[in-house]
Image (spheres, grey):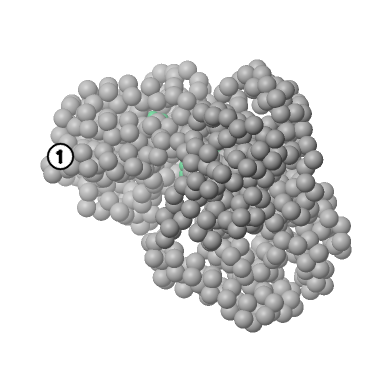
Amino acid sequence: MTTENQAVVTTKLATKLSKQVGIISIDYAPVNALSQAVRAGLVNALDALENNDDVKVIIICCEGRTFIAGADIKEFGKPPTTPFLPDVVNRIEACTKPVIASMFGTSLGGGFEVALACHYRVSLNQAKVGLPEVNLGLIPGAGGTQRLMRIVGPGQALDMITSGKHVIASKFVDTGLFDLLVDSELEKNTLTFAESLITNEKLTPIRVGEREVDSTGFDWAQAKVSVAKKARGKQAPLVAFDVLEKTQKLSIKDGMAYEREQFLILRDSEQSAALRHAFSAEKQAAKLSIDAQPAKVEFVGIIGGGNMGSGIATAFLSSGFKVQLIEQTSDALAAGLERIQNNFIGNVKRGRMSQQQVDGYLANLIGDVDYQTLAECDLILEAVFEDIEVKKELFNKVEQVCKANAVLATNTSYLDINDIANTMKRPEQLVGLHFFSPANIMKLLEVVQADKTSDAVIATAMSIGKKLRKTSVLVGVCFGFAGNRMYTRYGREVQQMLLEGASVEQIDTALTGWGMAMGPLAVQDLSGIDIGHNARSAQPFPKHDKGYFRAAATMVSAGRLGRKTSAGFYQYNEGKKKSAPEVETLLREKASELSIEQREFSAEEIVHRALFALIAEGLALLKAGIVQRVSDIDVIWLHGYGFPRYKGGPMFQAKQMGEQVVAEKLGELRAEFGEELWPEYIAGSL
Ligand code: T1G
C-alpha cells in the first residue's frame, strides 16, 4: 500500500507492509522538515495503518540523510496551516497500535517531538537529538518540554531546552529515552524490534504523556539562577524555565496548552524574528552567484607562526588538513610550533578535544625555514607582519617555488590586496582569507575577492571555510574590508562621543547593556590602544573629521596603552578594571583644544549614535559593492564583533525600523555632522 501526498511533489509518504509492521516513510529533501504536506501525510498514513487490521505495529522512518530535522523553516513567518504540529504529535501518541520512531542523523525540534510522542524509539548510537528552538528565539511548541521532562527528568530536559544543544544518542544510555541503540543497520534492527513486540504480544502502547514528572530533589531555585546567568539577554531560555516549572505537576494536556501559549508569544517576538533572520542570513552567506568548482585542498602551507599564524594553523589541523609551518629562523619556528601545541593543550584542558584526537592532528604538522618545502602545498597562506612591501616580497618568493595551481592567500586585515596582486605573476591565484583572532576559535572568515581573483579560487576559498566549520562571507577589497571598515566607523563614533562628554563607563555600559558582548573601550584596552593608533597613523588623517580617534591618541601620548601598561581608558589593579578620573580630565582638555563642546549623554543616545554609525557604513559598503547582499553584513557582525544575535545584526535593526525612519535619522545626523561622515546611500538598499 502506498499513499502519496500530492501537495508537495518532493514529499512522498509511503506506507508498506512487512509481516504486520506498517512503515511510514518520509521523503522530503533535504532534511525531512515538517512541512504542511509532511504533517498531513503523517496523519493520513497513521489513519490508514491504524484502520488496517493486518497491521499490528507502526514504524515512522525517513529517507535521505536524517530523521526529521524540525519544523520547516520555509514556513516560518507564514500563517500556520492545519494540521498543527501539536495535534499531529498527539495523534501519534493516541494511536491504538505501538508506534516506533527509527532515528538517525539529527532529530531536532519538531522532529524530536514527533519521536518523543512515539511509543518506542530505536536509534543509531551516533545519531543526535536536540530541541534547538531557543536558537530561533522559541521554545518547543509541540509537547517537547512536557514529554522530555517526563522521560529524562527536569534537570536534563532544562539543560537541553535552554541550551539548544544537539546531544549524541549514546549519551542517553540509562535514561529510558531510547528503547534500542544500535551501531548500524537501523532499518533491519527497527524491524526486528517491531516484530519482537508482536511476538511478545506487547501491543498496548506505552504513552509518555500518561507518566508523571519526577522532580524529586530537583532544586528549581538554583536552576533558575543558572538559566538566567547563561541566557545573557535572551528571552526564550527564561520562558522555557517558566514553562517547565509551572507545568511539572500538570497533565500533558494542560502542560501542552501552556507550552503552546508561550510558544506563540515568542514566535511573534522581535528576538525570534532576529534569530530567524540570523539563521537564514548565514545560509545565504554561503551561497555564491558564480559557477565554478572548488579545487581539492589537503596540504596547507602557513607562513608566519605568530599568534595569528599559529591560530590559523590550529584551525586547519583541527579540521584534518596537513600543515607546513614556515618561519624565518629556527628559533621563531620552534616558538610557532609551541604556540600551536599550546592551543591544543588548551583545547584538551577545556574538554573540547581528547588527547588522542590532538595527537592525530599534531601528526599532520611539520615546520621548516625553507620556502622550497612549500612546493607540494595546495594552499599557501601568509600571516606575517602587516607591511605591504614585506608581503609583496613574500609572494614573489612563494611564486618561485609553489605548484602552478596552488591557491595563495593573505591574512591581511587592512592592506590593499590588489596592490599585492599587481606585483605577482599569477594574480588570479591570490585571495584574502581574513581570519579573526583567536583564529582557532572565532567563527568568522572574510573571503576577500581582489579584482583579478579567479572564480575557481573564490569557490575553493569558500569551500575551505566550510571545511574549517567557519562562517564565511565573501567581500571585496577596501581599507579594512567589510568588518574592520565598519568597526573603524563604530570606533570613531565612540571616540567622538568621548570628546563630546560621554564617559568611558557610560559608553561601555550603554552598549553592553544593549547586548554587545564587550564595551568598545574595554576592548581597546585589551588589544592595546597603540596597535590601532599605529595602524591609523600610517594613513592620511581625515581632514573633515577633527575628532578622529583623538581620544585614543591622547591615551597613547599619556602612556596609557591599555591593560599592558595597567592604564588605558580604565585603570587596572592586578587585572581588576576600575574607572580612571584622570582620563576624563585628559579628554575634557582635548575637547576644549579642539573646540568640541561637552554635554550630557543618555544611554539611549549612545546606542543610537553607535548603531547608526554601523548602519551608515553598512549602506556605504553596499553602495560600493563590497558585499554581495545586505544580510552578509549582519553575519559578519554576529560572528566577528560580538553583536547580539538576538538583535539580528545592524542591518536587520535598520530593516526593522523601516527605510523611512532610517532615512530620517541619517538625515538628522548628516545635517548635524556633515555629509562625509553620514553619506547619502542608495535608497531601497535595506
Ligand atoms: N527546514 C527546511 N530546510 C532546512 C531545515 C529546516 N528545519 N534545516 C536545514 N534545512 C536546509 C538548509 O537550508 C540547507 O538547504 C540544507 O537543509 C542542509 O542544511 C514546533 C518550531 C539539520 C543539522 O532549527 O540545525 O521545530 O542550503 O547545510 O550541516 O517545536 O541544518 O542545501 O538548500 O545546515 O548537515 C527547527 C535547523 C526547530 C534545525 C543539517 N529546526 N537545521 O546540517 O546541513 S524549531 C532547526 C540544522 C521547531 C517546533 C519548532 C541543520 C541540520 P540548502 P545544512 P548540515
Q: Residue at x 27, y 23 (%)?
A: 258
Q: Residue at x 38, y 54 (%)?
A: 126
x then y, percent, for residue 460: 69, 54
Taking the image as drawn, is residue 557 in sight? yes
Q: Nearer the viewer, residue 508 or 446?
A: 508
State the image quarter where residue 217 is shown.
top left
Question: Vertically, is 595 above or below 48?
Answer: below
Q: Quadrant of the C terminus?
A: top right
State the image quarter where residue 585 is shown.
top right
SS at mark 1?
loop
x then y, percent, for residue 450: 79, 50
* Residue that sits furthest to the left in the current view: 216
Question: Vertically, is 17 above or below 127?
Answer: above
Question: Vertically, is 350 above or below 130?
Answer: below
Q: Residue at x 44, y 18 (%)?
A: 81
Label 1: how many Cα within 10 Å (few below 14, some 14–19, many 20+): some
Q: Nearer the viewer, residue 207 or 603?
A: 603
x then y, percent, for residue 231: 37, 39
Q: Residue at x 41, y 35 (%)?
A: 234
Left or right: 164 as drawn, with respect to 369: left
Tag 1 residue: 214
x then y, percent, for residue 587: 60, 43
- Name the amino acid, label 1: Asp
Left or right: 380 as drawn, with respect to 231: right
* Residue that sits furthest to the bottom in the current view: 330
Left or right: 269 as drawn, with respect to 180: right
Question: Vertically, is 463 above or below 501?
Answer: below
How many badges with numbers are in the image?
A: 1
Q: Quadrant of the N terminus?
A: top left
